[in-house]
Amino acid sequence: MKVLVIGQGGREHALCWKLKQSPKVTQVFCAPGNAGTALEGTNVDIKATDSVRLVKFAQTEKIGLVVVGPEVSLVAGVTDAMEAAGIPVFGPSLIAAELEGSKVFMKELLRKHAIPSAEFSVFENSEAAENYVNDREECRLVVKADGLCAGKGVVVCGSKTEAIDAIRRIMRAREFGDAGKRIVIEERLDGQEASVLAFVDGNTIIPLETAQDHKAAYDDDRGPNTGGMGAYSPAPLITPELMAQIEVQVLIPTVHAMKRAKRPFRGVLYAGLMITTQGPKVLEFNVRFGDPEAQPILMRLKSDLAEILLAAATGKLDTIPDLEWDPRPAVCVVMAAEGYPGDYPKGHEIRGLDEAAKLPDVKVFHAGTTTRAGKIVSDGGRVLGVTALGDSIANAKFKAYQAVKCIRWDGSWCRKDISNKAREDGPRLIQTAQRPVADGEGKPEGQETTLRRKPE
Ligand code: AMP
Ligand code: GLY
């Protein structure tokens, strides 16, 4: 089977690398890809949002499975276009991707089905939103643009002035364009953050090993937010008890709710959670693998990824063998360009990649890279995801940073504390009340929503 991966980041390099290992896969294509995906297969010069050309290419090459990486492709309707052409595709449809594409849709769905999340209100004009903030006693609020803003449309506020400023920037100045036509204002939650990802085929849910990213640019979680400066797997914060709670209170009811809303969900469901004293609450959903969470997770996956993704694409996740995981933890350190997450230069030659590749249990995933005159050069803000497996999180961290030391280009930098959080997160058990059953809940039409637990 030939596969086509759509996207060009570290996540897509990890997908290509893992898919290539499948005995079922004869050839891996990546559109548009980066210098790393070109080492695993063949890059195709088509934009990740150009549905028409992507479908044509998939038809000409008789692609047996298309894997959609980034959210921009999902909200551009690439999955629907592939489905319409009868090509098996892993990723949610346009209307299912709204779970990530619209915070208003997501929050209203959660409220309707009593899935735990922060209290919220929706506003369509700035004046009403400002009045709401002014009339409240509580000033710990979070202001969120409705649409996609590459992780930048969320402002966590500590005062009314900050909240009003955020409303004006999003709704009046339209800093994020039409994504700011509507906003959500929600209560600010306290706790530790955790992410849970699961493969979903519409009816069956298979949770993945846990992972956690580091969103802030600098050490000790300081500085501006980024797409993610590193990640580790597993996340010790998520104990088996907490995972069971998340499955029952979040994953199952969400997949069930999407089915009831006639937007059956297929793909990776990624729940960003705040673990509060009242239990896990949903901060956001992503409808795809996280980047860089995909890198350590896929490095630990021993099962055949092509088999899993094809089963998810065709509604057969109930038929595949239990997933197998490498018990060793993995750590991914992102190496970035000088200036990221602000403006950054491109085109610097990257040295030391061969040296790093020789280290055992290390894989250097490319993100913002390209090839020029036979040399690999930087071509983005997040340039590489240096990933290593180790006997412990500390050992995986040590190995990843050893590999980082081999690699250099003008202005390259990284956080030095990736995975330290894992050691600070003591396991804890959270007591919660029973989840109330909302009106209209009950059995969805058609098949049951089922969850396949990890075998003991
Ligand atoms: P989101 O894109 O909605 O996950 O928001 C991005 C980041 O903002 C999250 O990872 C949290 O750190 C923070 N955040 C979002 N919503 C809340 C909330 N209700 N309370 C506290 N922090 C939040
Ligand atoms: N690392 C977070 C994301 O992919 O959105």
Image (spheres, grey):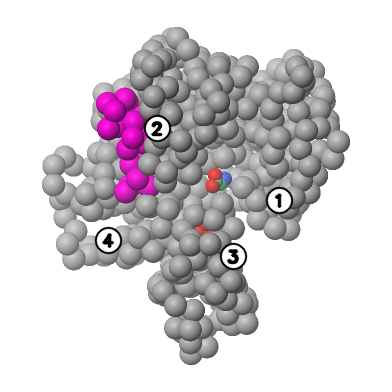
Q: Which mark is residue 275?
A: none
Magenta region: 79-97
Q: Is residue 454 visible?
A: no
- The total number of labels drawn is 4
Cα–Cα gap, marks 4 and 1: 37 Å
Residue 92, magenta (yes or no): yes
Q: Can residue 121 be seen in this view?
A: yes
Q: Earlier in the sequence, mark 3 or mark 4?
A: 4
Q: Which of marks 1 and 3 is nearer the N terminus?
A: 3
The residue depicted at 38 percent of the width and 47 percent of the height is: 97
Q: Which amino acid does label 2 sit on?
A: Val
Residue 138, magenta (yes or no): no
Q: Earlier in the sequence, mark 4 or mark 1?
A: 4
The answer to whether marks 2 and 1 mark residues whose Cβ atoms lie closer than 8 Å is no
Say whether residue 23 is left or right of residue 320: right
Q: In which quarter of the image is the C terminus?
A: top left
Which of discs 1 and 3 lies nearer the camera? The answer is 3
The residue depicted at 27 percent of the width and 61 percent of the height is: 113
Q: Residue 113 carries which label?
A: 4
**Residue closest to the eye, 63 or 21:** 63
Label 1 CB less than 8 angstroms from ligand 2: no
Cα–Cα gap, marks 4 and 2: 37 Å
Q: Residue 175 carries which label?
A: 3
Circle 2 sits on which residue?
52
